[in-house]
Structure formats: C-alpha cells, structure tokens
Image (tube, rainbow, N blue to C red):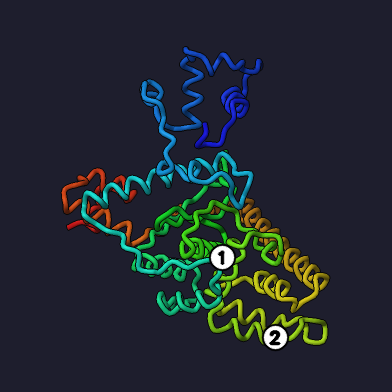
Amino acid sequence: MQMYRLTEDDLLTQVGQGFKTPLARSDLFSKDIKLNYLKRIDKIFEKGLHYYLDPKAPEDSKEASIFFRKTSFATDELSLGAVKTVNKFEELKLSLEAIATLSEIEYTRKIRKYNINENSQRAALEIRELINPVFTEKRRDFLKLLISKLAEMNVLVFEFIETHNKKEKANIDGFFLKPNFIVLKRHQSFRREIFTLAHELGHYLLDEEEVEKIDYFGMAEKNISKIERWCNDFAFAFLAGPYLTTLNSLGVANSTNDYHISEVEQISKKTHLSEMAIFTRLLYQKQISPTSYSNIRNDYQEQFQLRQKEKEREKQLLKEQGIKQRGSVAQPIPSPLFISTIQTAFYEGILNEYEVSKRLNIKPEKLEKYIQ
C-alpha cells in the first residue's frame, strides 16, 4: 500500500467497487480475508495469491521502489495506472541488474554527471557532440536512433504503450530511475515523446530520479523547480541544436513580422520541436507578449481540433461505405542494450530459450533472429 501510495480508505474504495454495501475496515484489515476480496486486492497489486500467504513481511527498502526513495514528485497526483507502470519497470530494472551481474555485464557510466549550477545549454551542446543525433525527417526513426545512441552510452530506454480501452491510464509522460533507466509513454505525437526522452535524459545527467507528466505549455512559468527548469532548458537546446542561435537572434514577435511564424515553422521542421514548444520558448525569453502567445496558442488548438474532426469524419465515411480500417498493433521500440543483455545472458546459460522469448516478447519461431 505504501509503494502504491494507497491509504486504507483508497484500498477499501478500490476493492469495494460495484458493491451495494461499502466494505468495512474489518473486511480487509483483519486476520482473515475472504477469498473474493483477496482476488480483488490482487487485481490492484498483481502479485499472485501466493504472495499474500507468505508470512514474511513485505520489504520497504529504498532499492525496491522509487516510492520508498522519494516522497514528492513533479506530478503530485499520480494515478494508480501510473504507479503500476512505474512499479512494473522498477521490477524489470531489478531483474535486469541481477541478470547483468550473473552475466558479468557492467553498465559503466560513459556520460559524466552534471550539477544543477552548470549551464544547461552548454551541457546540451556537449551531449549532442557525444551522441551526435543525425536528424531524420521521420520522427519515429529519429526516436529509434536516439534510443540506439543512448544504448551505446549504457543508458536503457523503454517505451510503454496504453490501449484506448485500458481502464487505469498512467497520467505521466515518462520517468527516470537510477542509475540508467529511462521510460517513455508512447504518444500519437512522436514530437512529444522525443521531447520527453530529451527531458528525462536531463534527469539522467543530473542523476535525479523523477516520475512526471511534462507540462509543455507550462515551460514558460517561473514557479517550476530548478531541476525541472534545467531539464526543460536542456531538452529544448539539445533538440534545437544549431537552430538555438537562430531562435535567440529573432527580435520580438509581433504583427509587423507576422510573429515569426514562417521562421518558427522552418525551425520546427528541422528539429522535431513543435511550433507551440518554440513559441512557448519565445514567451519564456520575453520575445513574444503573453497576449500574442495566447492568441497563437488558441489558433493552433483550433486548427488541431479541426484536423481531428476531419479525421473522425473520414473514419465515419469509410465505416458507412463498409470499408474496414486495419491498423497494426503498436510495438515499443526495443533498446539494443536490452537485447544484447538478454542475448549475453542466454549465451552464459543464465536464461533459457523460453525465458529469452518471454523477455523479448517474441514468438519462439522468431528466436533464431536474436540467438544463433
């Protein structure tokens, strides 16, 4: 309950969903618990019924969960779905660390640690030279390239994908777990996910764990923490690269220069930064007035809503015509470092073929592609 940040009232509410009569504390917090209640409890914690029969008390060590290492997060109200997601990857991290140790693999840090007082833009330029992310127009390919480049630096990056019908959604964009674990939420917009990766990379550089939903429109606010400000500034500069100088040299955006819209569009195309992220940066640097920024933001949101309505109209039209739309199931981008760790563990006899297939989430007939 502590790990999942649940109070007794929270657990009673979760377990008692759908019951006409609310559960009493004695139904759950007593020596004996009915099996149907226990099954409902396990739907939350997903440990298996055998877990609750173990007389050993659950461990609350700091190594077990970030929720034992930190008490506050950039996103205060983490949903149950978010906590479950973090705990799932925390378990994966601990499992990988054990496999790496048995396989004599060392994830030696190849990028030095930075501190909060160092210039974030200078850090971004240093990391760009080290990682050298070659720009590609296809955003998924660029994200895949970044994940591969970070793997070379012994940084593991994972994605999690939520289906539209999932009940408990994770209200986060990503998180960083020490020493080298970054997790991203797959978005419809790869631009958003790319920025999240750059932001979490900032946390890795500072060696500061975090679980968060990134407020892209709130980046111009003055009241965010020093760490979040540093990571935002780093992420923007890292993705902007040489175009940061171009952006900084622009004068104040106003009606006489059409609010630099054409320049912003060009920079956006060449950096994978969204146009609104760039305008938010201009607002932070006082290169555009709050009123002009608000008008542009409203205009972009209106355009986005119109595009969404058009997509829905096209889908409805195809449905009426009896044309079935087939969409492939989204698959997370695998980290080469994760794959190589599992491969080494197999060659060292730590994992068998079944375990390799399960961990890589592949069918047994495709195993030869990964191990020979």
Instruction: Say which quadrant the C terminus sits in.
Output: bottom left
Q: Position of residue 92 (x, y in %)?
A: 37, 46
In primary-sequence order, the first of circles 1 and 2 is 1
Name the amino acid, label 1.
Cys
| CA neighbours of label 1 inside 10 A, class few (<14), some (14 to 19), many (20+) | many
Residue 343 higher or lower than 54, as above or below: below
Q: Position of residue 82 (x, y in %)?
A: 54, 44
Q: Which mark's residue is nearer the viewer, 1 or 2? A: 1
- The foreground one among 99 and 208 is 208
Q: Secondary structure beneath disc 1?
A: helix
Residue 121 higher or lower than 14, as above or below: below
Find disc 1 in the rendering and name its residue.
Answer: 231
Q: Residue furthest front?
A: 117
Residue at 82% over, 82% down: 255
Image-based side of 215 in relation to 31, left or right: right
- How far apart, in angstroms, are the residues tagged by discs 1 and 2? 23 Å
Q: In which image quadrant can residue 132 be found?
A: bottom left
- The foreground one among 258 and 223 is 223
Q: Secondary structure beneath disc 2?
A: loop
- The foreground one among 81 and 303 is 81
**How many labels, in total?**
2
Image-based side of 100 in relation to 312, left or right: left
Image-based side of 353 in relation to 43, left or right: left
Find disc 2 in the rendering and name its residue.
Answer: 250
Residue 366 makes an appearance in the image:
no
Q: Position of residue 349 (x, y in %)?
A: 16, 48
Name the amino acid, label 2.
Leu
| CA neighbours of label 2 inside 10 A, class few (<14), some (14 to 19), many (20+) | few
Residue 132 makes an appearance in the image:
yes
Residue 117 higher or lower than 37, as above or below: below
